Image (tube, rainbow, N blue to C red):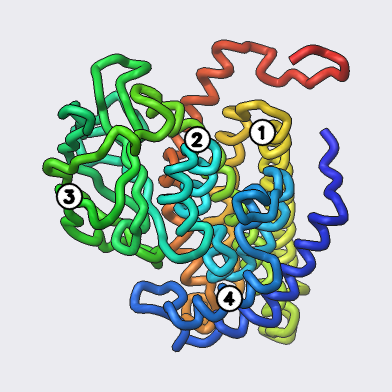
Amino acid sequence: MDFTISPEVEGLRMRIARFMEDRILPVESDRAAYDSHGNIAGAPLQALRGEARAEGLWCLQLRRETGGGGLGKTGMAVVYEEMNRSIFGPVVFNSAAPDDGNMMVLESLGTDTQKARFLAPLVDGKSRSAFAMTEPHPGGGSDPGMMQTRAVRDGGDWIVSGHKWFITGAEGAEVFILLARTSDDARRGHTAFLFHRDDPGWEIVRRIPIMGPEEHGGHCELRFDGLRIPKENVLLEEGRGLKVVQTRLGTARLTHCMRWLGLAKRCVEIATEYSAHREGFGVRLADRESVQVMLGDLAMRIEIGRLLVMKAAWEIDRGGYAQKEVSMAKIHVANLLHAAADTAIQINGARGYSQDTPLEWIYRYARQARLVDGADEVHKMLLNRHLTEQGRGFWSWDVAGDAD
């Protein structure tokens, strides 16, 4: 495992860092640049997106022939971390969830026709997308075997009926990937479909109010009542919906972690800067052992998170699934993000609790990290499954020259 990055990746990281410092952070500090849901408003977003695209910092996660930067997962780990130094960063570079995950799965599994209709507008930044899988009880969440939404054949089409909720970005999306049950087969009983916002037979029931700031388009409840989807909009093939989910969510979980590391580092940055000049009882906060312990612990935990993320990215780049590695990274970095925001707020005191810094934004946002794309407990159960199957081999090293 060699985590040395190429000069090209380092060059991209440095360019993103400069763009962040010169262009994005000043916008983030302007409260007029926020929309009513706590994210960057449309006008400043479009201006920054134009500049990012002009500087060649657009869709770096996609292949060059698709219109992206051609980065592998290890390169993405480096630049995504830098992009999320700001809470506005990822969406400016068209590397924010859920669009980045949806674009990557369409790029990987879509037909040429599907790419032209559904992927190209996302790459161009002309539309947004959503991934509709999660359902209210008694439907499927982390367990797709519980899925209630069904698609049944009608001639050459499929007719969808069902109920989804907490679908990120749905209110602003034009492109949707929908997972529905098409048979009762445990392994081949789900199919992924593509549909457009203007297709009849479905509705947004409500935009669900949440604790934290929201992605563009919110988190919505959807109902399907006769949505007709032509067979050419089946993604991959009938019965391979779980393969689509595996392809999308494994990488999506990891890209979340890449971005969260950037936010965790920003929390440390704000806390370190404040503690360096704030005094109490004649002593700088930075000189107090308690503060030094807090920041030192975060520095260590961030580096552990970076190593977990990079190992998972390396495994995917060399053709592996990295299921264990992604689960470990997801658990660790999700909890780290919350701890980093909480510690930074504590060091900043009332300033941290105010909106004078993005710490309170990050703190509210961070609580969802332990839930999205699989709760902590689900990933720990998956790790135990690997441990049960592999025994002491769970901790084996790769040996040079061994066949895969």
Q: How would you rate the neighbour count of disc 2 (Cα within 10 Å): few for under 14, some for 14-19, many for 20 or more?
A: some
Q: Residue 86 — which label?
A: none
Q: Nearer the viewer, mark 2 or mark 1?
A: 2
> Is there a contact, CB below 8 Å, between mark 3 and mark 1?
no
Q: Is residue 304 visible?
A: no
N-term mark: 4 or 3: 4
In what element is the residue under mark 4?
Answer: helix
For disc 3, the marked residue is 202
Residue beneath disc 1:
316
Would you name the residue on which mark 2 appears? Answer: 109
- Residue at 53 percent across and 58 percent down: it is 123
Residue drawn where x is 77% and y is 73% of the image: 287
Q: Is residue 90 above or below residue 44?
A: above
Mark toward the start of the polypeptide (3 vs 2):
2
The alpha-carbon separation of the residues under discs 4 and 3 comes to 33 Å
Q: Looking at the image, is 223 positioned above or below residue 206?
A: above
Q: Which comes before the other along the chain, label 4 or label 1?
A: 4
Q: Is residue 306 left or right of residue 180?
A: right
Q: Which residue is mark 4?
A: 50
297, 360: nearer the viewer: 360
What amino acid is at disc 4? Gly
Where residue 289 appears, as percent x and y from the top left, is 74, 65
- Count how many numbered circles sit on residues in the image: 4
Residue 367 visible, this orientation: yes
Q: Do the CB atoms of the residues marked 4 and 2 lie less than 8 Å apart? A: no
Mark 2 residue element: helix
Distance, label 4 to label 2, CA atoms, is 28 Å
Viewer-proximal residue, 278 or 135?
A: 135
Disc 4 from disc 1: Cα separation? 31 Å
